[in-house]
Image (cartoon, coloured by chain):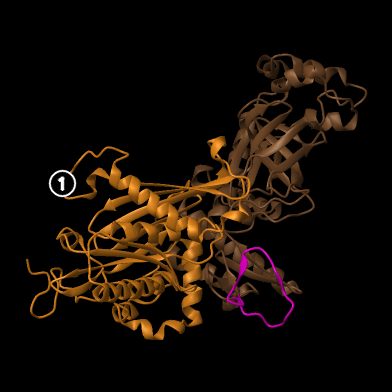
Amino acid sequence: MRNLQLSFNQTQKVRLEKALERLESLSSKSNPNSCVTVGDTIPVYEDGILKGHGTSDQKGELAATVCGVVERINKLIYVRALRARYKPETGDIVIGRVIEVVPKRWKLEINFTQDAILMLSSMNLPDGIQRRRTAVDELNMRSIFTENDLVCAEVRSSQGDGSLQLQARNQKYGKLERGQLLTVDPYLVKRRKQHFHHLEEYGIDLIIGCNGYIWIGDHAEARDKMVVDQGSNSEQPIAKCDKNSMDLDEQDGTYTPQEARENICRIANAIRVLSRLGFNITVEVILETVNLSNSLNLDIHDMLGSEFYVLVAESEAERRSLSKRKR
Amino acid sequence: MEFVSPEGLRLDGRRPTEMRQLRAEIGNVAKADGSAVFEMGNTKVIAAVYGPREVQNKSQQMSDQALVRCEYSMANFSTGDRMRKPKGDRRSTEISLVIRQTMEACILTHLMPRSQIDIFVQVLQADGGTRSACINAATLALQDAGIPMRDIVTSCSAGYLNSTPLLDLNYVEDSAGGPDVTVGILPTLDKVTLLQMDAKLPTNTFEDVMQLAIEGCIAREYQAVGMPPGFMIDSHGKGIRSYNYVPDRYKVAKMQGLLNGNVYSNPTLVS
């Protein structure tokens, strides 16, 4: 709800407030004690508790060190900060931007306290063959990713000193092209089984990175093909990477058609609306929002108008109350 | 010059132990990790926090803790006479250092090794007490950025003019040349992190003035916590008695204010 600077008229204001009130009443965690700010004491009901993130011991009492929500899991008590940078966990799928190419590794900006490291050795070569990385590979690193490229990868491990290692050992990871990157607050993205989505009806690839970076791009057929028959047509991808990619785009017909671009923008706007309203971002909700805009015959640019915000908030309230009733 | 009238009122109509009206707002800078605008009377300050992020200058990187940097500046239009000030003048360098040290004392820097936190504060309107306003704004911005801290820092200034201790000096009182005590405290830990005075004062008077400044800090902490305006008038130096009693309702309001970027001191928006 931050930075929601829109001009609502009176009815829209009332409707939005009503929808938000309804959402608030639906949320199970309406316990006022679960919200803390810096320095607040956290009530402890049992002894032998474990202090988690965002807590500290002050004069024998447990105090919060960040503003957020108190979470209690068995004996562990921690404070989940809502507005903070991304906290990586092993196995997370993230999207990052290459900011530096240094010997044997790329440095990626992933909205973490430090730059993440993607080693040349922890990524699959374009030809898909498992072998030692030679000095030639090292020299050709820029032919894989150069500065400012967007890369999708997986968190391999985070060391004790806070540095972060990534890996891209699968064909589904790699460079992202022909699409849009959106940044949302990381707390809006929940960890799920599936972060890669192929929206077939729109012909779009959607990658929801755990670090709050979301990629919406034209469906990349080539990448999938490589997964299926890596061995047989290994010749072709090599040729693809070696040549200059610009003129190859035109030859290949990888030009993004107008329709696909419109779909990308529509989905992107749906995510923008959801993130500004502070709703969790999942494929289901995104698709529902897109369908809502389609059913209303809204133009893409009208999706960022105040009326659509109100409608999305209302439909979300409706959806949550329905799912609650089912349970 | 007479700073306190025979009726016991100051130049701007306040009583000696009365604070100016506070207003705070967070989330004003979209691209920053955390940001806040803090106003007290006519003094208005904006703070933006970037980070924790990768250290820009590798030689300054510390492997066991975060690097805290602070930059203070005054907008050209902030003072009565519009002046083009050089960027790194002595005054702003000193205040940058003061703010940096105060914030560094409360940030848990060891939790974010090899990273850097940048705090930018800019004075938009200067009417005395910019130092304490900057510290308060920086605290709010750091909280907004989700940076772990020991406790919040609150700061307030007090002076001594016409043999009366005065809370929260404005520009006219500040430029009178009397003593000006700026205090920064950690309210829940009950510790002092900043104490500055530019003139001489007898010890017993100093204690009075400092006590007043500390009370101002505490009152300020609670106003930032989201008290309704009615309470605020009480708390001008005095309502501190009920300090330990903070109803849950306000806590929720405070929290929502923090999350939504609403105005703190305006309960109609918060609740």
B196 w.r.t. A94: above or below: below
Q: Which residues are magenta?
A: A42-61
B229 w.r.t. A277: above or below: below
Q: Residue at x 42, y 82 (%)?
A: B243
Q: Residue at x 60, y 55 (%)?
A: B110
- Taking depth in this image into account, of A309 and A59 the one nearest to the observer is A59
Task: Tell me where residue A54 appears, x and y as whole percent.
Answer: 62, 64
Q: Toward which corner of the image does residue A73 lie, by quadrant? A: bottom right
Looking at the image, residue A64 sits to the left or right of residue B36; the answer is right
Q: Residue at x 6, y 66 (%)?
A: B1
Task: Tell me where residue B249 appears, x and y as whole percent.
Answer: 48, 80
Mark 1 — residue?
A: B81
Q: The disc labelled 1 sits on which kind of residue?
A: Asp
Task: Tell me where residue A280 appears, x and y as whole percent.
Answer: 64, 58
Task: Tell me where residue A58 appears, x and y as whole percent.
Answer: 58, 73
As drawn, the chain in orange is B
Residue closest to the far right: A232
**Which colour denotes chain A?**
brown
- Taking depth in this image into account, of B234 and A283 the one nearest to the observer is B234
Q: Where does the C terminus of chain B fall, quadrant-wise?
A: bottom left
Q: Is residue A281 magenta?
A: no
Looking at the image, residue B13 sits to the left or right of residue B70; the answer is left
A152 w.r.t. B229: above or below: above
**Disc 1 chain ID:** B
Q: Toward which corner of the image does residue A247 lie, by quadrant? A: top right
Q: How many marks?
A: 1
Q: Secondary structure at mark 1?
A: loop
Task: Tell me, yes or no, if residue A5 can be seen here.
Answer: no
